[in-house]
Image: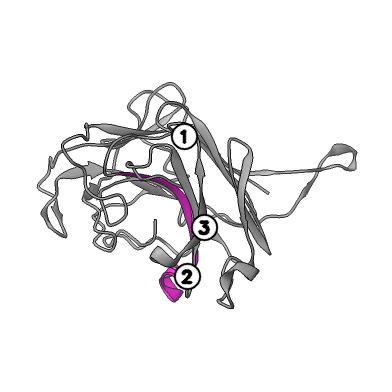
Amino acid sequence: MSSLVRFLLPALVTAATLAAAPAQADGGALAAAVTFNDDFDGAAGSAVDGSKWQLETGDNVNNHERQYYTAGAANAALDGNGHLVITAKRENPAGYNCWYGPCEYTSARLNTAGKFTQTYGHFEARMKLPRGQGMWPAFWALGNDIGSNGWPNCGEIDFMENVGFEPNTVHGTIHGPGYSGAEGIGAYYNGPNFSDDFHTYAVDWAPDRISWYVDGALYQTRTPADLGGDRWVFDHPFYLIVNLAVGGYWPGDPDGSTQFPQQLVVDYVRVTT
């Protein structure tokens, strides 16, 4: 996703900072331990679990996104069927101002800064993506030292990104010093229209490699050897982010073909060792 909402700097002190290590199961076998899980169970219309997530607010001038991220349940709510629904709307109900003037859209961006971070492990979400020109859903992570080291020195791992003009393609990317923004290092996966059904997006992160999967199928692995001598910064705690952006340099802005509201539906987010 490459850059930050300018009105909220995520907290740097984490309540649950974990270095992933295998857990010993009964019988001596090694089993992954669940370190973070949200199945989004709850009454329809209720807000996300505040012990796990915080909602960022504001716009994003860095990517030239068009939405204003709101707090509360107006744009991020449970549906009563075990899903989180992030809804992008063509509206400006409270006179929000964006970098380009009065905001045209609202949406939501959730993160776990100050609540959960982890170094290494398996990161996974099952999601149904929105559709349409200008949509930009993402499941990703930022280094929790962003306040002291800044972006991209803190590191960024994009577990899954999609832009609306590529309905059959998702991207996985890493960003760091010397390989950020359009120079990020990654690959893409072509499949079905990802807005038609739920799919699982996952990353395995180890000290010397990061691997990306869609529905269990491996489609790329990155190691320090891919960086051309630049620094591998994926060696410290990262926090999670799930958001639905509208417009921006990469997806382009919505046009006459884009129908609103659009929804990013999340079945679960899970992290293991």
The Cα atoms of the two marked residues, 3 and 2, are separated by: 10 Å
Binning the other alpha carbons within 10 Å of mark 2 as few (below 14), some (14 to 19) or many (20 upward) gives some
Q: Is residue 146 magenta?
A: yes
Q: Residue at label 2?
A: 179
Q: Residue at label 1?
A: 127
| Amino acid on which disc 1 is placed | Met
Q: Residue 213 at x, y = what percent? A: 59, 44
Residue 190 seen in the current view: yes
Q: Residue at x 32, y 52 (%)?
A: 56
Q: Which residues are magenta?
A: 135-156
Disc 2, SS? loop
Q: How is the image coloured?
A: one colour
**In the picture provided, is 272 more to the left or to the right than 96?**
right
Q: Residue 105 at x, y = what percent? A: 19, 43
Q: Are marks 3 and 2 in contact (CB under 8 Å)?
A: no
Residue farthest along the top direction in this orientation:
81
Marks 1, 3: nearer the viewer = 3
| Amino acid on which disc 3 is placed | Gly
Residue farthest along the right direction in this orientation:
27
Marks 2, 1: nearer the viewer = 2
Q: Earlier in the sequence, mark 3 or mark 2?
A: 2
Q: Is residue 76 above or below residue 142?
A: above
Q: Earlier in the sequence, mark 2 or mark 1?
A: 1
Q: Residue at x 63, y 37 (%)?
A: 216
Q: Is residue 139 above or below residue 157?
A: above
The Cα atoms of the two marked residues, 1 and 3, are separated by: 21 Å
What is the quadrant of residue 99 in the picture?
A: bottom left
What is the quadrant of residue 236 in the picture?
A: bottom right
Q: Residue at label 3?
A: 186
Q: Is residue 41 magenta?
A: no
